[in-house]
Amino acid sequence: MPANAGACLSSKSEFAQEHEQIRYMYRIRKKRIFQTKKPVRHCS
């Protein structure tokens, strides 16, 4: 097992945690936007 494997794993989990936080914040922001004004439909 390489010496830096642990560091790699920890940075990966940190990144995942950060990603979850960003997703959570985005969800809250989206909710607030939907509460303040009518949802705008975007053509996909």
Image (spheres, helix red, strand yellow):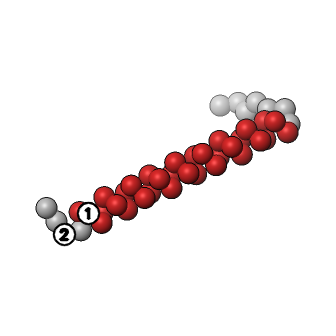
Which residue corresponds to mark 1? 6
Give how far across and how far down residue 23 sits, in percent. 58, 46
Asked if labels 1 and 2 touch by Cβ distance under 8 angstroms, the answer is yes
Q: Quadrant of the N terminus?
A: bottom left
Mark-to-mark CA distance, 2 and 1: 7 Å
Disc 2 marks a residue whose amino acid type is Ala
Q: Is residue 22 above or below residue 32?
A: below
Q: Quadrant of the C terminus?
A: top right
Give how far across and how far down residue 39 sits, in percent. 79, 32
Name the residue at 71% across, 46% down. 29
Instruction: Name the element at disc 1.
Output: helix
Instruction: Name the element at disc 2.
Output: loop
Q: Which quadrant holds residue 13? A: bottom left
Name the residue at 70% across, 30% down. 43
Disc 1 marks a residue whose amino acid type is Gly
Name the residue at 44% across, 52% down. 16
Task: Kindly give the residue lying farthest to the left in the view shown.
Answer: 1
Q: Is residue 34 found left or right of 1 in the rendered image?
A: right
Give how far across and how far down residue 20 sits, in percent. 52, 48
Q: Which quadrant holds residue 42? A: top right
Q: Is residue 13 above or below residue 41?
A: below
Which residue corresponds to mark 2? 3
Give how far across and how far down residue 37 sits, in percent. 86, 37
Name the residue at 78% across, 41% down. 33
Q: Is residue 15 above or below residue 27?
A: below
Q: Is residue 16 found left or right of 37 in the rendered image?
A: left
Number of on-image labels: 2
